[in-house]
Image: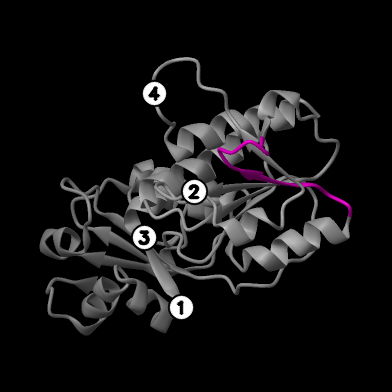
């Protein structure tokens, strides 16, 4: 099948997936670029449609289900692209159902109203690299399926359990199993992360770029942590701080 007009009905529906409202209504999201589409294929993501421009070199894509491919003109590819120089390869992927907190098999990163998509994607990618089992995006956190979030994950959202959820519910699930929950805070009650040695599964909460973790969430934690700053900077970027904590806490097991 080939589509050459940006006014085509299917193209208009795909374009709507670039908004949170459109994704929620359709139950799908759009991936752009060879790397993300390859990751989706490799990890068995529920791909509905592959969109390939007439100029794209699909030999770089590897094996893919030809029956799901729709070929489009360069104008259509440019219309769908969020990047300046599109590679002309997209995938429409079904959004998995969001379940409540279930079986806990490792460390989880919980994000409380982290608003920047780049930070969220970077933390998912870092959690993957550090060996975390999953990431939970709490209320007010940037949408996983935002284009910038997806590009920042570099496909890591296919490698671990990433879902939206109620942080209070997840905190209670960890504590019910006897697993510690660590918040992050800058106050006299917080402990330096250097003194913490978790043994088994745990949860780590990172908060909003400007306000940090909400007080009502911090009241639910077992212990709150901070990173000592030796220079004159007032604070660390939340994704950088999360990286330091995730690697240190898992390596200390």
Q: Name which residue lies at 72% across and 52% down.
A: 221
* Range covered by the magenta-colored residues: 178-190
The residue lying furthest to the top in this view is: 231
Q: Which residue is mark 3?
A: 146
The C terminus - image quarter: top right
Secondary structure, mark 4, is loop
Residue closer to the observer: 139 or 13: 139
Q: Which residue is mark 2?
A: 212
Q: Earlier in the sequence, mark 1 or mark 3?
A: 1
Q: Name which residue lies at 37% across and 51% down.
A: 116
Residue 240, given in percent of the width and then of the height, sits at 47, 32
Q: Which residue is mark 4?
A: 233
The N terminus - image quarter: bottom left
Structural crowding at the residue carrying mark 1, measured as other residues with C-alpha within 10 Å and reported as few (<14), some (14–19) or many (≥20):
some
Horizontal side of 207 relative to 204 (left or right) equals left
Structural crowding at the residue carrying mark 4, measured as other residues with C-alpha within 10 Å and reported as few (<14), some (14–19) or many (≥20):
few
Secondary structure, mark 2, is loop
Horizontal side of 146 relative to 93 (left or right) equals left
The residue lying furthest to the front in this view is: 188
Q: Name which residue lies at 15% across and 58% down.
A: 78
Mark 2 and mark 4 residues within 8 Å of each other at the beta carbon: no
Number of numbered callouts drawn: 4
Mark 4 and mark 3 residues within 8 Å of each other at the beta carbon: no
Gap in Å between the C-alphas at discs 1 and 4? 43 Å
Mark 1 and mark 2 residues within 8 Å of each other at the beta carbon: no
Q: Which residue is mark 1?
A: 27
Residue closer to the observer: 26 or 138: 138
């Amino acid at each position: 099948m080939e589509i050459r007009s940006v006014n085509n009905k299917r193209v208009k529906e795909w374009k709507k997936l670039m908004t949170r409202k459109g994704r929620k209504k359709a139950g799908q999201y759009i991936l752009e670029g060879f790397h993300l589409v390859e990751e989706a294929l490799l990890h068995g993501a529920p791909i509905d449609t592959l969109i390939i421009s007439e100029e794209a070199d699909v030999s770089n894509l590897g094996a893919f289900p030809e029956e799901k491919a729709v070929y489009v003109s360069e104008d259509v590819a440019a219309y769908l692209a969020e990047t300046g120089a599109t590679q002309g390869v997209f995938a429409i992927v079904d959004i998995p159902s969001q379940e409540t907190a279930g079986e806990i098999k490792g460390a989880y990163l919980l994000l409380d109203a982290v608003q920047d998509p780049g930070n969220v994607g970077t933390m998912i990618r870092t959690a993957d690299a550090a060996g975390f089992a999953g990431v939970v995006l709490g209320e007010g956190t940037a949408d996983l399926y935002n284009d910038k979030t997806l590009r920042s994950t570099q496909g890591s959202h296919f490698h671990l359990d990433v879902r939206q959820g109620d942080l209070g519910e997840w905190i209670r699930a960890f504590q019910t199993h006897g697993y510690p929950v660590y918040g992050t805070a800058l106050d006299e009650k917080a402990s330096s992360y250097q003194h913490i040695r978790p043994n088994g599964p745990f949860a780590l909460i990172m908060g909003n770029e400007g306000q940090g973790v909400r007080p009502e969430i911090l009241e639910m934690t077992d212990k709150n942590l901070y990173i000592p700053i030796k220079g004159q900077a007032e604070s660390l970027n939340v994704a950088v701080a999360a990286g330091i904590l995730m690697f240190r806490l898992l390596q200390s097991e």
